[in-house]
Image (cartoon, rainbow, N blue to C red):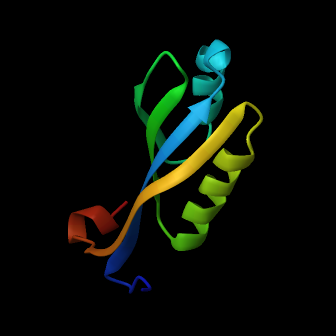
Amino acid sequence: MTATPNTVLANICGVLVHIRPEQRATMEQQLLTIPGLEIHAANEVGKLIVTVEADDYQQAADSLSQLQTMKGVLSASLIYHHAEELEVTQSESQP
């Protein structure tokens, strides 16, 4: 699936992340440096539910790879992925 001039490719990845609980505050700040990442839930044992949104497959893969190799991340499991071409409206394409 490739975006055309009138569409944009939207990727949404749902990821379960396990971090060291004693580093939660620091790790949350580091995770938020990954482009398109949002933290939706976290618990006291270091498990977080995050989403990563990206404009193409490579950007999504790069963000997931960065997440999985980040120091302090014990594991990061892709739970859900959805990609869809969305039509760009005229107001969205104007600067």
- The quadrant the N terminus occupies is bottom left
Q: Farthest front residue?
A: 45
Identify the residue at image location x=55%, y=62%: 60
Residue 32 visible to an observer of this rendering: no
Which residue is nearer to you in this view: 51 or 6?
Answer: 51
Q: Is residue 4 left or right of residue 89?
A: right
Expressed as whole percent of the image width and height from the top left, the position of residue 84 reads 32, 73
- The answer to whether residue 72 shows anywhere in this view is yes
Residue 14 spot, x, y in % from top left: 42, 51
25 shown above or below 10 = above
Q: x, y percentage for residue 34?
A: 61, 43
Q: Nearer the viewer, residue 60 or 78?
A: 78
Quadrant in which the C terminus appears = bottom left
Q: Nearer the viewer, residue 30 or 77?
A: 77
Side of 82 relative to 63 (left or right): left
* Residue sitting at x 55%, y 39%: 17
Count of number-bearing discs: 0
Residue drawn at 23 percent across, 63 percent down: 91
Residue 37 is situated, as x and y percent measured from the top left of the image, at 50, 43
Q: Nearer the viewer, residue 44 or 25?
A: 44
Quick check: 48 left or right of 76? Answer: left
Q: Is residue 3 positioned above or below 35 on the image?
A: below
